[in-house]
Structure formats: C-alpha cells, structure tokens
Image: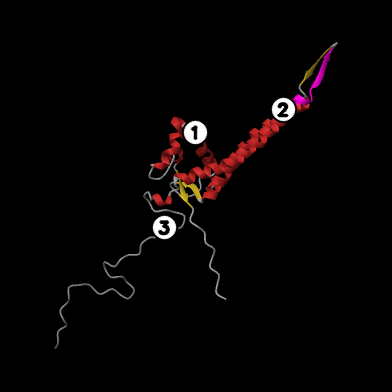
Amino acid sequence: MTQPPPGTGYGPEPGYGQPYYGAPQQTYQPQAGYYPPGPNPEMYTPWADRVLAFLIDQLPVALIFGVGYAAMLGSSLVVLAFPEQNCVGDVCRDEPSMFGVVLMIAVMVVVAALPLAYMIWNYGYRQGRTGQSIGKQVMKFKVVSEKSGQPIGFGMSLVRQLAHGIDSLICYIGYLFPLWDPKRQTIADKMVATVCVRVPPQYPPASGMR
C-alpha cells in the first residue's frame, strides 16, 4: 500500500484569479480635478502669470475710468459754457447751469458704480463659481480651495479679494510671496486657504475613422 507524499509544509495554492502573496497591489489613481498631497511646484501658477491676469482684469476698470473722465470733463465744460443768470433786483450774476451740474453728478455716480459692479461680478460671482476671473481664464489657471480643489463660492471669493488688502501692507510684500512660497500663495491665499493651479488643456474628442 503506497503512502501519500509527505506534505510540503505550505498551505494550499491559491485558486485561479487570486494573487500570490507579495504580488503588487493596484495603486490608487486620484480622480480628475484633485491633486496628490504634498507641494508640487509644477501645478501651482507662476507669479508672472498671476500678474498678467491681474492686469487683464483691470483693463475694463481702466476703460470705465477713462470714458468717465472724458464725460466728466465734457459735463464741466457744459457748466462753464452755458451759465444761468440769477438776478436779484438790478444785480445779475452767472451761476453754474443746473443741467450741467446734474449731468456731472450722474456721470460721477456711474463712474463709481460701474467698476464696483464689475469687480463684484468678476471676482465674486464669476471667480467664485468657476474659479476663474476674466484674466485667469485668459492665462489658463484658476483659484480653488486648498482642501477640496473646488471653486470657493461667491462669498469667500469676495473675502479673498478683501484680504488682498493685507498683501498691500508693508510695500506690497504679500503680493511677492508667490516668488518663494512652496505653494506660490499670497498672504490672502494663506488666510482663506486657496491656491492658484494651472488648468489642464482641453483637447477635442478624436473623431472616428470614416
């Protein structure tokens, strides 16, 4: 009667489809729109791009002030060119035209209101919802939450803009922080926990062969 071969001392071999001990496990790939932990200088927006985006964002404001200045100059000329006479008894004197004064006040209100409305829309609504102001879209980067990687919303986007006032203190040194900061953040970015990151290029889907 034959004896079974002695045991090898190891457990049963794994079945089909089961990985052997020590086999490499599948690595987790981060989802699109999220970045792996740890600073990676390549994904943060360079300082020069942020400066160019700021200048682009200010172009409409400069245009509004330029047109407004010309309109105020024109209305002041109306005041001087068409005075109204005010006579008391035999004494008459020229006074500023009421129409010209009203026109000048209206121009001043519009010149003050339009840039404010533009800033709220561009930096609050647009940037808060999409992560991009007009300048940031042109320069192909966006501002997102450091924790979630998503746009920060209307309210926090306005708070971030107000926090830039801290950046302007002490010779605007806060705006220079991205030159040496690992995450290229300004002081305002650090206060509200935001980072500026590059927007990956969007390629159109490949058309099928015909």
Please tell me whether mark 3 sits on a helix, a strand or a loop: loop
Q: Amino acid at mark 1?
A: Gly
Give residue 76's mark.
Answer: 2
Q: CA distance from mark 3 to mark 1?
A: 35 Å
Residue that label 1 marks: 165
Q: Residue drawn at (35%, 64%), measured in percent from left and top?
A: 26
Pointers 3 and 2 in contact (C-beta within 8 Å): no
Q: Amino acid at mark 3?
A: Pro
Nearer to us: label 3 or label 2 = 2
Q: Residue furthest top?
A: 90
Q: CA distance from mark 1 to mark 2?
A: 34 Å
Residue 168 visible somewhere in the drawing: yes
Q: Is residue 150 magenta?
A: no
Determine whether, in the image, residue 116 is placed left or right of residue 45: right
Foreground residue, 81 or 88?
Answer: 81
Name the colouring of the figure.
Answer: secondary structure
* 115, above or below 201, in the image: above
Q: Earlier in the sequence, mark 3 or mark 1?
A: 3
Image location (x, y in percent) of residue 120: 59, 40
Residue that label 3 marks: 30
Q: Amino acid at mark 2?
A: Ser
* 174, above or below 89, in the image: below
User: Which segment did they paint magenta?
Assistant: 79-88
Please tell me whether mark 1 sits on a helix, a strand or a loop: helix
Nearer to us: label 3 or label 1 = 1
Determine whether, in the image, residue 109 is placed left or right of residue 97: left
Q: Earlier in the sequence, mark 1 or mark 2?
A: 2
